[in-house]
Image (cartoon, helix red, strand yellow):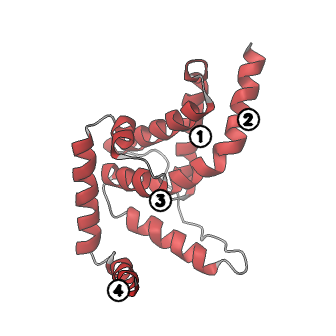
């Protein structure tokens, strides 16, 4: 029984670790904090594995756990480990634009409070509905809407969405 559980969890972890790490990088800003967030998420998911049931439920459980850990961690004043320096991302030849875009998106997301950041990541990266986001965050759909609106307004007011808005306006004009 335990061996089957371990095999199922290992298969889940092997398949979903890259996706969980990408989500953690968006939520936590990359580096050791993102890796720690994924590790803690996986430990909690493993402990609850006997209750989860389906593989689809495991993904949702892990994502919800990750978001809640991030918000909980942000409420603490001290964050135990603080990296001394930040290592640059290494770009593969021919992927400079993608790497630069990924770094820019993570930097922009770090300007937002954790709850607003979580809403944007779940909405636009994972493409969850407002109801699914509300379930993951343990709040009402109205709270999800207001957090998303505040986050997007803060990004617009900070001048961080002007390029995207311009590109969207141009694509609408062409249609």
Mark 2–mark 3 CB contact (< 8 Å): no
Sequence-first tag of 3 and 4: 3
- Reading the image, the residue beneath label 2 is 11
Which image quadrant: the C terminus?
A: bottom left
Residue 144 lies left or right of residue 56; in this view the side is left
Residue 126 lies left or right of residue 131; in this view the side is right
Q: How many marks?
A: 4
- Reading the image, the residue beneath label 4 is 173
Sequence-first tag of 2 and 4: 2
Q: CA distance from mark 3 to mark 4?
A: 35 Å
- Reading the image, the residue beneath label 3 is 29
Mark 1–mark 2 CB contact (< 8 Å): no
- Taking 30 as reference, is 94 above or below it? below
Between label 2 and label 3, give the one nearer the viewer.
2
Q: Nearer the viewer, residue 87 or 100?
A: 100
> Which residue occupies 22% across, 73% down?
157
- Reading the image, the residue beneath label 1 is 39
Sequence-first tag of 1 and 2: 2
Which image quadrant: the N terminus?
A: top right
Q: CA distance from mark 1 to mark 2?
A: 16 Å
């Amino acid at each position: 029984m335990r061996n089957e559980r371990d095999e199922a969890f290992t298969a889940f972890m092997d398949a979903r670790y890259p996706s969980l790490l990408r989500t953690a990088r968006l939520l936590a800003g990359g580096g050791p904090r993102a890796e720690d967030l994924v590790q803690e998420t996986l430990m909690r998911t493993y402990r609850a594995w006997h209750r989860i049931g389906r593989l689809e439920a495991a993904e949702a459980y892990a994502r919800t756990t990750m978001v809640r850990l991030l918000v909980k961690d942000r409420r603490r004043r001290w964050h135990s480990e603080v990296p001394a320096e930040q290592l640059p991302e290494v770009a593969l030849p021919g992927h400079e634009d993608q790497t630069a875009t990924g770094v820019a998106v993570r930097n922009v997301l770090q300007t937002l409070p954790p709850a607003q950041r979580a809403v944007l990541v779940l909405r636009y990266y994972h493409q969850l509905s407002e109801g699914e986001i509300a379930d993951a965050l343990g709040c009402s759909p109205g709270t999800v809407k207001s957090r998303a609106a505040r986050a997007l307004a803060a990004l617009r007011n900070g001048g961080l969405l002007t390029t995207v808005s311009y590109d969207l306006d141009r694509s609408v004009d062409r249609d």
